[in-house]
Image (cartoon, rainbow, N blue to C red):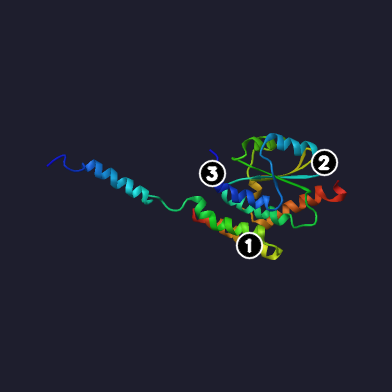
Amino acid sequence: MPYPDLMVAPMREDLTRLGFRELRTADDVDGILENTADPVLVVVNSVCGCAAGNMRPGVALSLRSEVVPPVLTTVFAGQDTESTARVRDYFTGYPPSSPSVALMKDGELVYMLERHQIEGRGPEAIAEDLKSAYQEHCAPEAA
Amino acid sequence: MRGAGPSWAGLALILLLGLSACGFGRSGPSASEQRAPCDSLAAQAIDAEDLGEARRLAARASDCYSGLQTAR
């Protein structure tokens, strides 16, 4: 059963304030991932306390680097059920995981940070992993 | 005289409803209530303009979440 919107709203806003676009439907997901050649960051947000609580500031810190994905998107697991299921169709080879962070390029998954790589780690460590992925896949020479 | 006032069962029901309305019997704050201060720190970290401040607040949020897990 989804959590009340009132409870989830601040967790959504943690990302939307940073410029993340919320994908609420399967069409939203396809529209972005099928039609964007630039790297797209997809954050699977979650209520899941400590992991998601560390993930969101970790993502925020990672975006303070010089090289960042030009397109920022998010779905909310357990809330945006249709769009979450659809993005997971793109995460080939990975079991459903939330919270998680994926980097897509030309509709293909090029990097995935799963929940087990988030749990028990602080925002700085999460940010460092993400920054390395941005450097590898989003730097001009990686295009 | 029997039947003139509320029965013992009725009194017990009224007492139970009253205590429930006052939150009696709750085992303590919910998980989301316990997490709220940590979530607040995380949100402040996200909003902080200064990178050093953002890092400091993010670390405090992380410690806060770790404290919750330890307490469980």
Q: Determine whether, in the image, residue A55 is placed left or right of residue A106.
A: left
- Residue at (52, 51) in percent of width and height: B32
The front one of B27 and A4 is A4
Q: Mark 2, chain letter?
A: A
Which quarter of the figure has residue A38?
top right
Residue indicated by mark 2: A37
Distance Cα–Cα, label 1 vs label 3: 27 Å
- Considering every residue shown, the one lying at the far right of the view is A141
Q: Where residue A141 is drawn, which disc sits there?
A: none
Q: Amino acid at mark 2?
A: Ala
The residue lying at 69 percent from left, 34 percent from top is A26
The answer to whether one can see residue A135 in this image is yes
Q: Residues within 10 Å of mark 1 (few under 14, many from 20)?
A: many
Residue B30, position as x, y percentages in the image = 47, 50
Closest to the camera, between mark 3 and mark 2, is 3
- The chain to which mark 1 is attached is B
Q: What residue is pinned by disc 1? A: B57
Tell me the crowding category of disc 3: few under 14, some 14 to 19, or many 20 or more residues within 10 angstroms, Cα based. few
Do the CB atoms of the residues marked 1 and 3 lie less than 8 Å apart? Answer: no
Q: Which residue is mark 3?
A: A4
Amino acid at the residue labelled 1:
Leu
Residue drawn at the location 68% of the way across and 41% of the way down = A23
Residue beneath the point at 70% across and 57% down: A61
Q: Secondary structure at mark 1?
A: helix
Question: How far across and down, in percent of the image, does residue B48 sit?
Answer: 67, 62
Are the numbered discs 3 and 2 placed on the same chain, yes or no? yes
Residue positioned most to the left: B1
Q: Earlier in the sequence, mark 3 or mark 2?
A: 3
